[in-house]
Image (cartoon, rainbow, N blue to C red):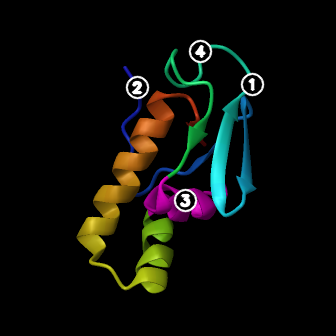
């Protein structure tokens, strides 16, 4: 059973992907099979995903990521918590992020 993602979780990009910012867009390329969904060869993040991704340094808990985003975007904390937990949970499921 997968580990649940909480605000105390620390997430970082998997060693099995490469992520690059190209013309203002973050593109994620899996380096091994079994990453993401079979039909997807690469991923491009929407603006919310990009903002979250840029905060995932592998050192800060997701609660600190929410704090940083709340400061940057002046958005309701409950909404940011849901966005961060949902995004990270999905990316861990797809093996694009790992829990440290």
Q: Earlier in the sequence, mark 2 or mark 1?
A: 2
State whether residue 63 is above or below residue 39: below
Residue hosting label 1: 31
Q: Visible in this render: residue 59?
A: no
Q: Badge 4 local density, few (<14 within 10 Å), some, or many (20+)?
A: few
Residue 9: where, in percent of width, then height?
Answer: 47, 50
Marks 3 and 4 in Cβ contact (< 8 Å)? no
- Residue shown at 62%/62% (left/top)? 54
State whether residue 92 is above or below residue 47: above
State whether residue 94 is above or below residue 50: above
Check the picture and name the quadrant holding the N terminus.
top left
Marks 3 and 1 in Cβ contact (< 8 Å)? no
How far separated are the C-alphas under marks 3 and 1?
Answer: 20 Å
Figure quadrant of residue 50: bottom right
Residue hosting label 4: 34
Label 3 SS: helix
- Tell how many labels: 4
Q: Visible in this render: residue 21?
A: yes
How far separated are the C-alphas under marks 3 and 2?
Answer: 24 Å
Residue hosting label 3: 50
Q: Badge 1 local density, few (<14 within 10 Å), some, or many (20+)?
A: some
How far separated are the C-alphas under marks 2 and 1?
Answer: 22 Å
Q: Earlier in the sequence, mark 2 or mark 4?
A: 2
Compare residues 81 and 35 and report the one nearer the observer.
Answer: 35
State whether residue 40 is above or below residue 83: above
Compare residues 37 and 10 and report the one nearer the observer.
Answer: 37
Residue 5: where, in percent of width, then height?
Answer: 39, 44
How far separated are the C-alphas under marks 2 and 4?
Answer: 16 Å
- Is residue 51 magenta-colored? yes
- Residue shown at 73%/55% (left/top)? 22
Q: Is residue 83 left or right of residue 91?
A: left
- Residue shown at 52%/15% (left/top)? 38
């Amino acid at each position: 059973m997968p580990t649940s993602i909480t605000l105390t979780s620390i997430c970082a990009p998997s060693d099995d992907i490469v992520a690059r910012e190209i013309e203002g867009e973050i593109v994620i390329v899996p380096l091994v099979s079994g990453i993401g969904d079979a039909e997807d060869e690469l991923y491009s993040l929407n603006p919310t995903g990009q903002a979250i991704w840029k905060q995932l340094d592998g050192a800060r808990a997701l609660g600190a990521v929410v704090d940083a985003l709340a400061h940057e975007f002046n958005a309701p904390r409950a909404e940011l918590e849901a966005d961060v937990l949902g995004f990270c949970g999905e990316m861990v499921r797809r093996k694009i992020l790992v829990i440290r």
